[in-house]
Amino acid sequence: MEYLNKQYPDNTTILNNLGQAWFYLGDVDRANEKLDKVIKAFAYHPQANYTQCLIQESKGNKAPAIEKMKNSLAYSYSLDKINKLRKLGYSVKGSDMRTPFRPDPDPLGLHNFMRPDAPTSYEEELRLGADWDAFQKQVYDKISALNKQELPYLQANNQKAQQAYQQYQNAKGDLSKLTAAPKQKENIYGKTAEKNLEEMSKDGGIAYRLETAKKQIDNLRNDFDNKNEAERKQLEKENKIIAETETEYAHKGENVGFDNCKVQKKYSEWVYKNYNKPLEEAYKNYLHQLYIKINEELYWRQFTTDATAFEAVKIGAKKEWLAALSNTRYIATDKYGKCAPPQSKDSRYKLADFDDMHCTYKSVLDFGVYKQIVECGKMRVEFDAGRLSGNFNFKAGNDGRDHFDNATLEATVIDKSISTNKGPLQIGASVKAGVGVTFTSQGIEDVYATGEAKVTVKSNSIETFDQHISEASGGDKSQPGMGDAQLSDKGVEVGVSGKMSLISGNTSSNIFVNTPQ
């Protein structure tokens, strides 16, 4: 090893092996010298850090030993390292292990969903009521649609569980008859994900903060329920109307009711000051914590569940978010009649849609020229009937039905090709031209022309090549090179393809060169 180190200086593999060798021979100083060079090149080298942890532990240096083992764990998980850190008095956190890259902090597009404005007074409550009614109705419809989307994934998971249970029943207690389920491919981030999911529910974790935010909302609502009736009676009493003259139905000095609009105004002011305004702040905090919790949980669950189960997890996350949004409405104060002129209007509120997180669940029905592809909440129909081809795209709507999104149709007008043999070469040429159109439910978006031209040149087979030479030499196979033809039947293909919009005039083109077999 020392010889190799001189031949290839600063090679981390050789240095690490050399450091391990000196350590197990008992020379920790020489071992540390080599391992320090390894760690200088790669700070989280698993083996070098592990051995240096053992060295520091043997010297009674607990804190450096913990840091070395944490560095060893960062890129290489093992239960042995977890136990070693526990023995040293350290509890491993999810952040101690390698974290995969996060391509999108909001993969489902939860922030696309906007609640209607929250009223701050009785007058605004009357004006915004239609928006909140429409919002909650659309949320209900969307959750119903998601329930339908979720059903196939839940059934698939239940079927797996039922098969396992049936197998257990058939074995009648004889475990040797049980067939092991096919082992799932282990995800390198699985252990990191499990640790982070576990930490979410601990004190101070995401689930804890969410629970605290929810408790603040519950306290306000409970306080309102406890004081509401008494406050209304007090306001009604303070604003009672005393009859000033005797009438058929009342005597002078008698209490004949209260002023509705005065009570309504004071009651609304009391509710908004003490409950609706602090509730709105509590709602915002709760939704912020829930947003973090859903995205964090969703991110780590993708490393611990299979594709089918994860689709159910994603749909469940969407339902959880929608249900929370719907449940953040203000406390209605319209208890005494509309005492302010309402600015009524039809609501134009439109609930957004979720973004599409990377979908690994895919179903394909192939009928030859016609193909139907379902990927999570989307469906695509593709067809190719020779000179006419295209695709139609659909998205699941809030009503649970598939709605047309967009489509493309292409027709080939010219499709000509020729081929000829010239000596040992085969030469082919083709030209293709067509038109296409893209459209949505709103109408035509674009009309374009397409074109492609290419030339292919390749050698004929060896037998044909021999035949040409034989004919050229009068059938004399003793001529030099006869029988030694080594030309490959690989060729070269050169062409150009392009597309031009007939509406905007935009063009795109591509020149290609390849060597087909």
Image (cartoon, rainbow, N blue to C red):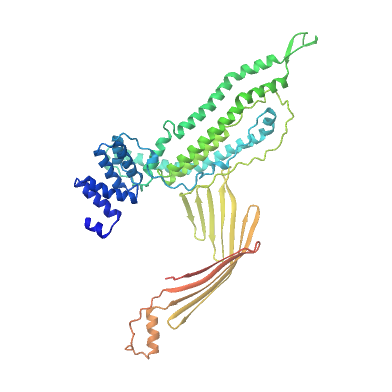
Is 206 above or below relative to 375? Answer: above
Q: Nearer the viewer, residue 38 or 302?
A: 38
In the visual, does 374 lie left or right of 50? right
At x 70%, y 20%, the residue is 263
Quarter the N terminus occupies: bottom left
The residue most toward the left is 25
In the visual, does 63 lie left or right of 267? left
Residue 153: horizontal and vertical position, in percent? 46, 43
Is 487 above or below relative to 101? Answer: below
* Quarter residue 466 falls in: bottom left
At x 66%, y 22%, the residue is 267
**Residue 162 appears in the picture as rendered:** no
Residue 456: horizontal and vertical position, in percent? 48, 74
Q: Nearer the viewer, residue 164 or 332?
A: 332
At x 59%, y 60%, the residue is 409
Residue 431: horizontal and vertical position, in percent? 55, 72
Residue 18: horizontal and vertical position, in percent? 24, 52
Quarter the C terminus occupies: bottom left
At x 28%, y 48%, the residue is 35
**Residue 434 appears in the picture as rendered:** yes
Q: How many marks?
A: 0
* Quarter residue 171 falls in: top left
